[in-house]
C-alpha cells in the first residue's frame, strides 16, 4: 500500500512539473505575440506621424510661397498706383517698406507655427515610444527544469511512502 501511495505521489509531482513547464512556455509565447503586436502598433503610429510631418512641411512651404506672392502683388499695385497718380518717391518707399515689413512678420509667423507643429510631432513621437515601451512585456516565467521535477517527485514519493507507513530500513531495527 505504501508503495502504491508513493507511486501516485511521484506521478502527480511529475505531472504537476510538466504542467508548470507548459504553462510557462505558453505564457512566454503569448508575451512574445503581445510584444510583436505592440511593436507593430508603435511603428504604425510612427508612420502616421511621418505623414503629419510631411503635411506640416508642405503646408508651411506653400504658405510661405503664397505670402511672397501676395507681397509681390502688393508691391506691383503700389508701383502702378504711384506711376498713375504721380505720387512722390518718399510715400511710395514708405508703402513698399510697409509691405516688406508685413511680409517679414507673416513669414516669421509661418516659421514659428511650423516649428511649433514640428515640436508637437516630436512630442507625440516620444509619447508613442514611451507608450510602446510601457506596454511591452518583459516578465520572466519560471519553468521548472527536468532535474527539479525529478527531485520534487522523489521527495513527494518519499514523503508519501513514509506517511503511508512505509519504512526505509534506516535505523537499528
Image: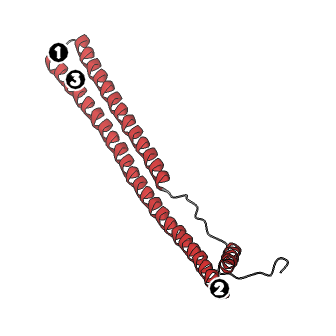
- Residue 79: image tag: 3
Query: Which colour assignment does the render follow?
Result: secondary structure
Q: Position of residue 43 (x, y in %)?
A: 45, 57
Name which residue lies at 62% across and 84% down.
5
Q: Position of residue 148 (x, y in %)?
A: 69, 72
Q: Position of residue 164 (x, y in %)?
A: 65, 81
The span from disc 2 to disc 3 (Cα, nearest Å) is 108 Å
Q: Position of residue 71 (x, y in %)?
A: 26, 29
The span from disc 2 to disc 1 (Cα, nearest Å) is 117 Å
Q: Quadrant of residue 1?
A: bottom right
Q: Nearer the viewer, mark 1 or mark 3?
A: 3
Give the answer, above or below, for where 64 lies relative to 82. below
Q: Residue at label 2?
A: 7
Q: Which tag, 1 or 3, sits closer to the chain's start?
A: 3
Give the answer, above or below, for where 8 lies relative to 152. below
Q: Nearer the viewer, residue 36 or 170?
A: 170
Q: Quadrant of residue 147?
A: bottom right
Q: Which tag, 2 or 3, sits closer to the chain's start?
A: 2
Contact between marks 2 and 3 (CB within 8 A): the answer is: no
Give the answer, above or below, for where 115 lies relative to 58. above
Name which residue lies at 22% across and 23% down.
79
Name which residue lies at 19% across and 26% down.
77
Q: Quadrant of residue 94?
A: top left
Secondary structure, mark 1, is: loop
Residue 78 located left or right of residue 159: left
Secondary structure, mark 3, is: helix
Name which residue lies at 36% across and 48% down.
52
Q: Nearer the viewer, residue 169 or 7?
A: 169
Q: Residue at label 1?
A: 86
Q: Nearer the viewer, residue 101 or 93?
A: 101
Contact between marks 2 and 1 (CB within 8 A): the answer is: no
Amino acid at each position: 500500500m505504501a508503495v502504491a501511495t508513493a507511486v501516485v505521489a511521484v506521478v502527480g509531482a511529475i505531472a504537476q512539473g510538466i504542467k508548470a513547464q507548459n504553462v510557462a512556455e505558453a505564457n512566454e509565447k503569448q508575451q512574445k505575440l503581445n510584444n510583436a503586436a505592440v511593436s507593430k502598433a508603435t511603428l504604425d503610429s510612427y508612420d502616421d506621424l511621418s505623414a503629419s510631418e510631411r503635411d506640416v512641411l508642405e503646408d508651411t512651404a506653400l504658405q510661405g510661397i503664397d505670402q511672397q506672392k501676395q507681397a509681390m502683388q502688393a508691391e506691383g499695385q503700389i508701383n502702378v498706383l504711384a506711376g498713375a497718380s504721380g505720387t512722390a518717391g518718399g510715400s511710395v518707399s514708405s508703402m513698399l517698406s510697409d509691405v516688406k515689413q508685413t511680409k517679414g512678420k507673416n513669414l516669421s509667423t509661418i516659421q514659428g507655427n511650423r516649428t511649433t507643429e514640428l515640436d508637437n510631432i516630436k512630442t507625440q513621437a516620444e509619447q508613442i515610444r514611451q507608450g510602446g515601451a510601457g506596454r511591452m512585456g518583459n516578465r520572466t516565467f519560471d519553468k521548472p527544469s527536468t532535474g527539479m521535477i525529478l527531485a520534487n517527485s522523489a521527495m513527494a514519493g518519499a514523503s508519501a511512502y513514509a506517511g503511508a507507513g512505509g519504512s526505509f530500513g534506516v535505523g537499528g531495527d
